[in-house]
Amino acid sequence: MVFKDYYTILELKTNKVSSEQIKNAYRLAVKKNHPDLNIKDGLAEEKIKDINEAYKVLSDDRQKRKYDRIWIKNSENAKQKKYKNEREQFDTKGGSFFSIFFGSSNNKDDENNVKTTKNPIKGENVETSVDVEIEEVFYGLDKKISLRTSDGKMKVYTISIPAGIRNGEKIRLLGQGKAGKNGGKNGDLFIKVNIKNNDKFEINGNDLYTNLYLSPWEAALGSKVVVYSIDEGITVSVPEGIETGEIIRIEGKGYKDGKGGRGDLIAKINIMIPKNITKEEKNLFKKLSTISDYNPRS
């Protein structure tokens, strides 16, 4: 298991610190490394995880005492290792104490004993997108997508899309991007969620738009009709004389806003003319045309 120096993670120079100092260091570290403020830092989320982990251990007195024993031991080992590295660098660059006074050993294997190390490189992130229906993401769902990996094979991923996700938001799958190099971590897979409009609904922010179709007499006389949202039907009162293009706004019946509430449902009025009418209906329309003075072109 790789040892993590929680004091270094919280930028504390010693373990002789109070709980208040630990708390203050934690707050500063979170603020400094927050992913929202470090968008270009691909490791920001990993740093936050380490910071939270460090605070969880060091803020608990019992766990801190237990950790300190390990920390002191590792600190002593680190000092010894540092001293050893400095001696090796001195031996390599400036010559050892023995060689300075008694000459070089002329050992041809010396050059071969110098080890080169390569820094770990995180793999590249991969981005793709998935199309979903409004009704699907309103309730949330698990969706499968197939992607071709770097070796040419198809791989199926199951992603959990939370209820009420916003259009254009991305879901992150840790470690599912391209492979890292030299022991580096794999990149991540980002899936952008595209919410599709359909014949029933259009989405705009938290609001849903739908069409409300009315007959000429419903529009002229006013009426009570049912408008359907995703999860229920709502009875609304249509005022007399409403026209095509006007709207009726129904509060709190739109899309989820991510805070436990919902946007509005906006019904757009469309007055429909019957194409196939009976003889009696035709006569009524003729009678209306003779007794009405209404002229929409005046």
Image: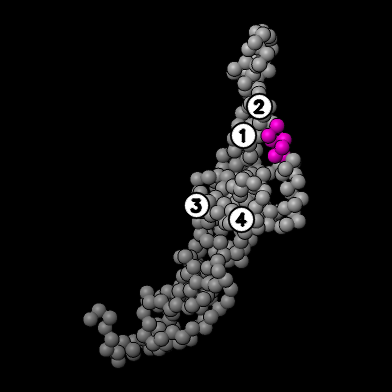
Asked whether, in this view, residue 261 is left or right of residue 67, the answer is left
CB within 8 Å, label 3 to label 1: no
Point out residue 85 in the picture as x, y percentages from the top left corner.
Answer: 65, 27
Main SS class of the magenta portion in the image: helix
Q: Find out whether residue 64 is within the magenta segment.
A: no
CB within 8 Å, label 3 to label 4: no
Left or right of residue 212, residue 52 in this image:
right
Q: In terms of sequence position, does the residue under pointer 2 or pointer 4 come before the other? A: 4
Disc 2, SS: helix
The residue under the point 56% across, 42% down is: 125
Amino acid type at image mark 1: Pro
Report x, y in % for residue 129: 54, 50
The residue where tag 1 is placed is 120
Q: How busy is the neighbourhood of tag 4: few (under 14 within 10 Å), some, or many (20 plus)?
A: few
Nearer the camera: disc 2 or disc 4: 4
The residue that label 3 is drawn on is 37
Residue under circle 2?
85
- The magenta stretch is 74-80
The relative height of residue 159 versus residue 200 in the rendered view (above or below) is: above
Name the outermost residue toward the bottom: 291
Is label 1 in a helix, a strand or a loop?
loop
